[in-house]
Amino acid sequence: MRNAIQSFLVALVLAHAAAAQAPSVDAESKAAMAVADSVLGALSSGNTAVLARLVLDSAVVGGVGLRDGVERLSLRSWALYVNRKGPSTFTERGFGASAHVQDRVAQVWMPYDLYTGDKWSHCGVDTFTLMKSDGRWRVASLIYTIEQPPACQKHPAGPPG
């Protein structure tokens, strides 16, 4: 019993020390991650006005991965999404984001899952490059992977809706 208590106390102290040393997320990282999350929300809701405010005019979007055994690689302008008419046909949700910020450049890494209607499609990682000007972050590029579990994780909250 004494060894169990000692082991528990050691584990508790180590966990507390690790938490105390864990890096805190600064305000700029939080702001960049919020923009990335808002982009996914705007894409999923079909809100092109919000999307246009969040991405640079010259921004690009691209994906890479295997679908049905065929390698897919694409790179195109955000205009495809910003100028879209009508509601979105998919729901993309990010989770567990992290960010690296240096001056006016940020990189956000965000796992995601994607559903077409209520049907599972795929998951992967979104990598956003953001640039800050006039006091606000905007997306310069979004490059994503197209994967299936176990290579990627579905959203921890389960299916949307």
Image (cartoon, helix red, strand yellow):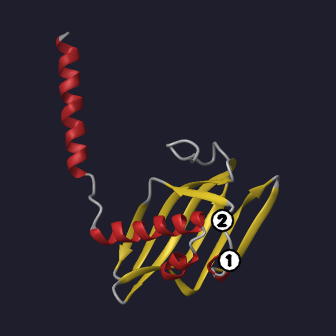
Q: Residue 160: horizontal and vertical position, in percent?
A: 57, 48
- 16 or 59: which is nearer to us? 59
In the image, is residue 125 above or below residue 13? below
Instruction: Give neighbour class at mark 1: few <14, some 14-19, many 20+ (Cα, 10 Å).
Output: some
- 44 or 21: which is nearer to us? 44
Residue 72 shows up from this direction: yes
Secondary structure under badge 1?
loop
Tell me what residue is drawn at x 44 percent, y 71 percent. 35
User: Between marks 1 and 2, how big is the CA–CA gap?
Assistant: 9 Å
Which residue is farthest front?
86
| Residue bearing the label numbered 2 | 88
- 111 or 160: which is nearer to us? 160
Q: Residue 148: horizontal and vertical position, in percent?
A: 68, 48
- Residue 18 picture quarter: top left
Residue 104 shows up from this direction: no
Tell me what residue is drawn at x 20 percent, y 40 percent. 16
Q: Which disc is residue 11 wearing?
A: none
Q: Amino acid at mark 2?
A: Ser
Tell me what residue is drawn at x 68 percent, y 77 percent. 84
Q: Amino acid at mark 1?
A: Arg
Secondary structure under badge 2?
loop
Q: Is 93 placed left or right of 13 in the picture?
A: right
| Residue bearing the label numbered 1 | 84
Q: Residue 100: horizontal and vertical position, in percent?
A: 39, 69
